Image (cartoon, rainbow, N blue to C red):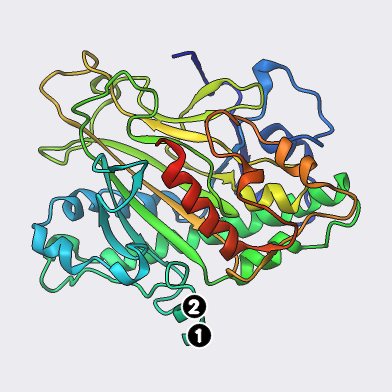
């Protein structure tokens, strides 16, 4: 595998600057997100990663440190407890999901997910929930009275998720400003309005089980993919001993394990999000809405290789992305003067993910229809 570390050029900005709508962060966003229409030339060494990190977010570190470790207790509940947390009618987009998702014909048992909406327990209208059951599921929280090891789970999940949503809304405001400078006809505050007022937010508390096969494969914990939605916030990760739940020291973990992205030069880059930072990456809907000013971030997660770290430790990983999206009826429309080729051909890693033009098949296609098309293509991608 050919890869380099991103530690030298991961763009990091301060929350105070992100929260200031009058601050011009165009240069920083172009270094982080720049796509086809970026005005700043880049070399391979500074090629945008499609991800930006934000430091000094009020209460973020405390909220992250309180919630992420709870994934261990959740992942090790008895099977009957997991069953009670499943939600088949939302296609397992709320509550517990393990082995329900697949790429190709193989169920994915490498990781388990707990999905939750941090903004509201009952999103949308009754009609919305009936029409879009996967987009507007009601939350399924653990019964904390019966599961004392998960005390405060709901409180901690909502606190972290709301911080992630607020931060994404601020980032959206600056992406709007960047897009307006680059393309004619970009509507003022288009992305900010959609992100600030949405009820469609999906936190995903992930537990990656120890790898017992395909240890040499680059994407053996999560395969290469683009997020099909709008903006994704990332709370970093935590490596731990699967048998004890204790966090691991850096020398106990393969240094090449973790998150990888494809930069604009097509290289696989290992991204290590600093412990005190939240990160934000681009989804395909924003690539469409900006006409390729910013492009989606192909990414995967690699598990530890055999022979690295302590041989007696079974390494697990915890992370918690939060996907902030618009309502399913939102039209994915290009700015005036942009063509579908402008938006689709701007993408990178096109050999790693299903082609955007095979899923976004007409200008103005709704987000809900695009999401369904994307699910279908990803399920068939590796078969």
Measuring from the top left, give residue 119's x and y in whole percent.
46, 71
Q: Is residue 44 above or below residue 92?
A: above
Q: Tell which of 375 and 321 is nearer to you.
A: 375
Residue at the outermost bottom position: 126
Measuring from the top left, give residue 270's x and y in whole percent.
47, 24
Q: Is residue 2 above or below residue 275?
A: above
Can you identify the residue that label 1 sits on? Answer: 127
Q: Which corner quadrant of the image does residue 345 belong to?
A: top right
Q: Residue at 85% of width from left, 52% of height from top?
A: 180
Q: Tell which of 251 and 291 is nearer to you.
A: 291
Give the class, few, some or many, for how many residues have Cα within 10 Å of label 2's Cα (few <14, many ≥20): few
Can you identify the residue that label 2 sits on? Answer: 131
For the C terminus, the image quarter is: top left
Q: Which corner quadrant of the image does residue 191 belong to?
A: bottom right
Give the class, few, some or many, for how many residues have Cα within 10 Å of label 1's Cα (few <14, many ≥20): few
Q: Is residue 46 left or right of residue 120?
A: right
Residue 77 visible in rendering: yes
Q: Is residue 48 left or right of residue 248?
A: right
Q: CA distance from mark 1 to mark 2?
A: 6 Å
Q: Residue at 42% of width from left, 80% of height from top?
A: 122
Do the residues under discs 1 and 2 have CB atoms within 8 angstroms? Answer: yes
Measuring from the top left, give residue 6's x and y in whole percent.
54, 23
Measuring from the top left, give residue 338's x and y in whole percent.
85, 48
Q: Is residue 64 above or below residue 159?
A: above
Callout 2: SS: helix
Q: Residue at 76% of width from left, 50% of height from top?
A: 290
For the N terminus, the image quarter is: top left
Callout 1: SS: helix
Q: Which mark is residue 357?
A: none
Residue 28 visible in rendering: no
Q: Is residue 218 left or right of residue 16?
A: left
Q: Is residue 230 above or below residue 134?
A: above
């Amino acid at each position: 595998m050919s890869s380099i570390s991103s530690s030298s050029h991961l763009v990091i900005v301060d929350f105070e600057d992100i929260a200031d709508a009058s601050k011009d962060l165009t240069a920083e966003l172009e270094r982080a997100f720049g796509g086809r229409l970026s005005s700043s030339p880049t070399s391979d060494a500074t090629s945008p990663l499609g991800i930006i990190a934000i430091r000094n977010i009020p209460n973020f570190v405390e909220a992250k440190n309180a919630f992420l470790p709870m994934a261990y207790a959740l992942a090790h509940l008895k099977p009957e407890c997991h069953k009670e947390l499943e939600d088949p009618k939302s296609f397992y987009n709320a509550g517990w999901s393990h082995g329900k998702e697949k790429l190709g014909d193989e169920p994915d048992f490498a990781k388990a997910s707990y999905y939750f909406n941090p903004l509201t327990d009952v999103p949308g209208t009754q009609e919305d929930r009936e029409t879009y059951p996967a987009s507007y599921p009601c939350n399924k929280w653990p019964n904390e009275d019966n599961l004392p090891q998960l005390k405060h789970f709901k409180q901690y999940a909502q606190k972290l998720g709301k911080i992630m949503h607020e931060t994404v809304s601020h980032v959206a405001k600056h992406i709007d400003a960047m897009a307006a400078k680059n393309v004619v006809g970009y509507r003022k505050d288009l992305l900010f309005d959609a992100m600030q007022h949405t009820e469609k937010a999906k936190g995903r508390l992930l537990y990656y089980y120890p790898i017992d096969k395909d240890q040499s494969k680059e994407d053996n914990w999560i395969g290469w993919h683009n997020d099909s939605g709008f903006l994704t916030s990332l709370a970093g990760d935590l490596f731990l001993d699967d048998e004890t739940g204790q966090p691991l020291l850096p020398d106990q973990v393969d240094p090449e394990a973790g998150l990888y992205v494809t930069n604009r030069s097509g290289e696989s880059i290992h991204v290590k999000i600093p412990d005190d930072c939240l990160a934000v990456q681009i989804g395909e809907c924003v690539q469409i809405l900006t006409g390729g000013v910013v492009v989606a971030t192909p990414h995967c997660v690699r598990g530890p290789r055999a022979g690295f770290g302590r041989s007696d430790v079974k390494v697990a990983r915890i992370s918690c992305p939060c996907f902030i999206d618009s309502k399913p009826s939102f039209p994915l429309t290009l700015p005036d003067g942009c063509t579908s080729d402008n938006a689709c051909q701007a993408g990178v890693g096109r050999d790693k993910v299903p082609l955007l033009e095979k899923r976004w098949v007409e200008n103005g296609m709704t987000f809900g229809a695009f999401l369904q098309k994307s699910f279908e293509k990803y399920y068939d991608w590796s078969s």
